[in-house]
Amino acid sequence: MLNLHVNNLNISKSEFNKILPIFSYSIATFFLMDFAFFIDDIVTTLHFSYTESFILLGIPFIGRMVTPFIYSYAGKIGVPRLALLSITVMALISFGMGYETSFPELFASRFMIGVFFGLATSASIEVSSITRDQKIIGLTMGGWAIGWLLGAIFFMILGSWELVSIAGIIFAPALLFSRKHNIISPMLRKFHFDFSMKVFIIFLLGFTPAYVLEIVPSYLGPSSFIESISAYSVAVFAYLLLPAMMIRFSLKKTVFSSLIIVGVSGILFFSTLNIAFAIIFTMFGLGVNSLLPIISRNLNVDPDKIGPSMNFSAVAGFIFPVFLTLGNEALNAAIAIFIASVFLFIFVAVEFGKHGPGNLSLKKLFSNQ
């Protein structure tokens, strides 16, 4: 999807607004994940079953899998412009959702949200990579936590899924700011399907905490707002903390220690519902996401394969909220966290044993090998 050979760029980094990728990733995540706070309200007002509601929560992740097939074509309008256009379209879809009442309507709208989420976030990651600014890259990926925060705050203030959906229209003017952001990136190329099973496994396991967190708002009920605001506020900083730890202590030590913390805190949270454990689990569970592309690159995986493999691993974002809620949610979530943490730990240990961690730095992620 993205060809991250930055040394070939002929674009001045000053031509890109450094706030744009953070804004785009954050708002795209807001439109994707605000639905996590809607579940109980949807069941009450529209009389959907919980299974139907969780299908609506997860279906955008299937839409996101379309991204690798259309990104190289859509990006021809200019990558920054594509990010802002995607936000505008998502705002219009969200506004329309506020007036939809049938499952097929909402299913179609949520699927399209996923398609434009994939475009917006892929463009955001590309723009942030061009800046080669560690803080911008970290905060762009931290847009996942910022988007969750916005979802919690909007629902806490407005109190209904219809009003939150309609209120999303405030982000529609994003496209108006694209006049100065119409650069066509030389990193784009014609579509060519690239896929790596190793990268697929890394992102599938690594994103498991984020996918498990999809069920937390409905699982905790009213207390979810306190948990979400507290946990995701702290999690934003984890996207900067873990890469910094990697530079200080090495990637292997940072990944292994983080996975241990994720596994233990996740199990303790779903066993006790203690908010302190939820904050730790959210912080490190999401923070690990910032290391996944770096792990992939240090396994000598072709950079062209990282984007598509990551997008296809998003199928788990649909599977988890549907199947975790069948039976004992707490037990299912704890088992999923334990299995993902242990298997990713073993996978990284084995692969690093084969290849060696090499010169582990963020700069390596965006440079030629």
Image (cartoon, helix red, strand yellow):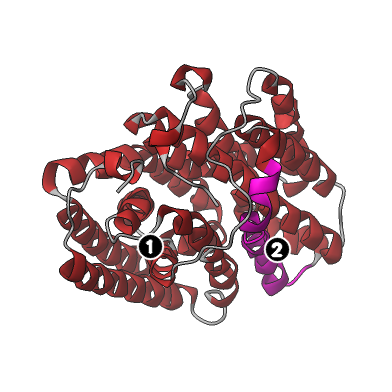
Q: Is residue 301 in view? A: yes
Q: Residue at 56% across / 44% down in the picture?
A: 121
Q: Quadrant of residue 45?
A: bottom right
Identify the mark nearer the N-term, 1 or 2: 2
For the residue labelled by badge 2, is the local secondary structure a helix, a strand or a loop?
helix
Classify residue 30 by image quadrant: top right
The secondary structure making up most of the magenta span is helix
Quickly name the residue at label 1: 206
256, above or below 91, in the image: below
Residue 87 at x, y percent in the picture: 68, 37
Tell me where the magenta segment starts and ends, as one range: 48-74
Neighbourhood count class around disc 2 (C-alpha, 10 Å): few under 14, some 14–19, many 20 upward: many
Residue 48, picture quadrant: bottom right
Residue drawn at (59%, 59%), measured in percent from left and top?
192
Left or right: where 102 falls relative to 199: right
Q: Which residue is mark 2?
A: 56
Q: Position of residue 220 (x, y in %)?
A: 50, 59
Q: Position of residue 46 (x, y in %)?
A: 81, 61
Q: Is residue 346 left or right of residue 143?
A: left
Q: Is residue 179 above or below residue 88?
A: above
Total labels: the figure holds: 2
- Asked which secondary structure carries label 1, the reply is helix
Q: Is residue 68 magenta?
A: yes
Image vertical order of residue 229 relative to residue 11, above or below:
below
Residue 177 colored in magenta in the image: no
Q: Amino acid at mark 2?
A: Leu
Question: From the viewer's perspective, is 108 left or right of 87?
Answer: right
- Tell which residue pokes out farthest to the left in this image: 249
198 vs 19, nearest the viewer: 198
Q: Is residue 276 visible?
A: no
Q: Nearer the viewer, residue 115 or 268?
A: 115
